[in-house]
Image (cartoon, grey):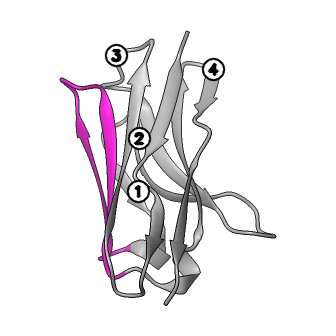
């Protein structure tokens, strides 16, 4: 059974940083599509950044230059380093894995950017 568990969210001031983690079990995730999405109150879930199965990294324009995705294949863990955070980055952040025709989600971790 594939499980994704996010951690690292919290309250941070504008301009601050956070690092999110997503620990994956049930698959060896190298080679699969892995991404971070977010959903702000009253808005649809949107892509933040992803590693595609073809080896590309795709960033949303709104986070380019501020957020960085990385992975530790030995730990089966995906990371999202978020710098220069803005109030509009406030959202629940979700980890996503696509394994063949199956789409898996974590339960999310809340990031609140506020002074």
Q: Which residue is mark 3?
A: 28
Q: CA distance from mark 1 to mark 2?
A: 7 Å
Q: CA distance from mark 1 to mark 4?
A: 20 Å
Q: Nearer the viewer, mark 1 or mark 3?
A: 3
Q: Which residue is mark 1?
A: 58
Q: Which residue is mark 4?
A: 101
Mark 4, other Cα within 10 Å: few <14 / some 14–19 / many ≥20: few
Name the residue rendered at 47%, 41% in the picture: 6
- 46 sits to left or right of 4: right
The disc, 1 or 2, on the residue closer to the chain's N-terminal end is 2
Estimate the x, y position of residue 114 in percent, counting from the top left.
Answer: 52, 84
Determine the image quadrant of residue 110.
bottom right
Q: Which residue is mark 2?
A: 52
Q: CA distance from mark 3 to mark 2?
A: 15 Å
Is disc 1 in contact with disc 2, using a CB cutoff of under 8 Å? Answer: yes
Q: CA distance from mark 1 to mark 3?
A: 21 Å
* Magenta range: 64-84
Q: Is residue 88 magenta?
A: no
The disc, 3 or 2, on the residue closer to the chain's N-terminal end is 3
Is disc 1 in contact with disc 3, using a CB cutoff of under 8 Å? Answer: no
The disc, 3 or 4, on the residue closer to the chain's N-terminal end is 3
Name the residue rendered at 42%, 87% in the picture: 14
Q: Which quarter shows the N terminus?
A: top right
Q: Nearer the viewer, residue 70 or 100?
A: 70
């Amino acid at each position: 059974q594939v499980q994704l568990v996010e951690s690292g969210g919290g309250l941070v001031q504008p301009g601050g940083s956070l690092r999110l983690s997503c620990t994956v079990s049930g698959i060896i995730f190298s080679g699969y599509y892995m991404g971070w999405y977010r959903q702000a109150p009253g808005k649809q879930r949107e892509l933040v950044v992803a590693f595609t199965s073809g080896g590309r990294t795709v960033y949303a324009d709104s986070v380019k230059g501020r957020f960085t995705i990385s992975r530790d294949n030995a730990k089966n863990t995906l990371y999202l380093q978020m710098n220069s955070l803005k109030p509009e980055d406030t959202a629940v952040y979700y980890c996503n894995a696509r394994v063949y025709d199956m789409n898996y989600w974590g339960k999310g971790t809340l990031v609140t950017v506020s002074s």
